[in-house]
Image (cartoon, rainbow, N blue to C red):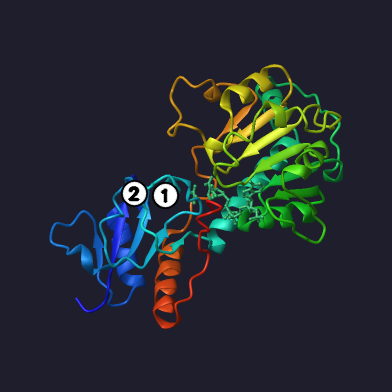
Amino acid sequence: MNKGVLALLIHGGTDNWSPQRWQARFTEACGDRPVVLLPDAALDPAEVHYAAVWKPVPGELAGFPNLRVIFNLGAGVDALMADKTLPDVPLVRVAVDDLTARMTEYVVLHVLMHHRQELYLRQSQRDKRWAPKYQWPAAAIGVGIMGLGTLGTDAADVLKRLGFRVAGWSRSAKQIDGVECFHGAAQLDAFLQRTDILVSLLPLTADTRQILNRNVFTKLNRTSPLGAPVMINAGRGGLQNEADILACLDDGTLGAVSLDVFGHEPLPADSRFWTHPKVVLTPHNAADTDADAISRYVGAQIARFEQDGALENMVDRKKGY
Ligand code: NDP
Ligand code: OXD
């Protein structure tokens, strides 16, 4: 083989995300580069120059002496960062318009659902109860987005255009037109105090683990038209303290939550989240992405990398995202 192999280490996908479907797509996206699905006993590990991975088993990437780049087939890299044997080569994550647009749809859907009192209205319909409540305008609601990266910035832009008072919180300082920007631990409280609907689009790192906890929820705006603040988490389950969420829903610290991600996925059948009346849950599908778009993105990055060594959306290993 004269071109370095692109090895696919893909576990856990079904249907459209099955390993075989990925192999067909990458074969199309990568021209004449050999694309090999692992495990493959016939493959010489020294021939592997690139790896595209989804949920690889820790240690699985360590056996390729000529590996140049690892492509994670999702945006979040927390699972890879936990692998202490991860080779010290550039790690690239997915940031494609298709993923971003789908996440923005999810965030806008859930912000509007709580803002427009949909839980109450659907229950009224089931009860055949004609009892409209006062509906405040979007401008009455402060939406606070934790994480102003690729996803948070796009969601902020659309929510702002709908009329919400949007703020964001990030690690480093930012300036975004029409979005009140906060950063760092020192500005977290001020960000929370003006927030009625908290949206989490953070990566899971040592600094953000369990950041969505009672201490944070109690600092959200207590005089919101919503009655009590709402939390929406589409980042990672490890960001949230699940016992705190349930206790805060039960005692009124939180009015409702939308959760796309959980500490244990699939969510166990005995979890209280399934049946809690103030919980809207989805099975980690907020941003199910067009797999063809991801394959083309990886194919284009490899082609450019071989031309001039440039890569986009590289993970900063020190920061962990
Ligand atoms: P980015 O890396 O582009 O953005 C991350 C943002 O979080 C940045 O603004 C960063 O700040 C901020 N941040 C990180 N650490 C901290 C911290 N300690 N304190 C304050 N802010 C912090 O990521 P994306 O927007 O692309 O994705 C975000 C996450 O969304 C992913 O990591 C993944 O876990 C999740 N995700 C979930 C999906 C789903 O289907 N549910 C789909 C896709 C992604 P700064 O800008 O200063 O670096
Ligand atoms: C991702 C995800 O990180 O789907 O891309 O969760």
Look at the numbered discs 1 and 2 and tell me whether their residues touch, using CB distance below 8 Å.
yes
Mark 1 vs mark 2: which is more N-terminal? 2
Quadrant of the snapshot with the N terminus: bottom left
Element class at badge 2 = loop
Picture residue at 51% right of the left edge, 59% below the top? 315
Q: In the shown orientation, is residue 176 left or right of residue 301?
A: right
Q: In the shown orientation, is residue 190 left or right of residue 154?
A: right
What's under tag 1, amino acid-wise? Leu
Name the residue furthest top.
251
Which of the 4 image quadrants contains residue 51? Answer: bottom left
In the rendered image, residue 40, in percent from the top left (x then y), is placed at 18, 57
Picture residue at 46% right of the left edge, 29% below the top? 267
Picture residue at 45% right of the left edge, 68% below the top? 297
Mark nearest the camera among 1 and 2 is 1
Q: Looking at the picture, does residue 61 appear above or below residue 185? A: below
Element class at badge 1 = helix
Q: Looking at the picture, does residue 116 appear above or below residue 309? A: above
Q: How many other residues sit within 10 Å of disc 1, few (<14), some (14-19) or many (≥20)?
A: many
Picture residue at 84% right of the left edge, 32% below the top? 224
| Residue annotated with mark 2 | 56
Kindly identify which numbered label has been placed on residue 306.
none
In the rendered image, residue 194, in percent from the top left (x then y), is placed at 83, 39
Q: Looking at the picture, does residue 217 appear above or below residue 235? A: above
Q: In the shown orientation, is residue 110 left or right of residue 74?
A: right
Kindly identify which numbered label has been placed on residue 80.
1
What's under tag 2, amino acid-wise? Pro
Q: CA distance from mark 1 to mark 2?
A: 8 Å
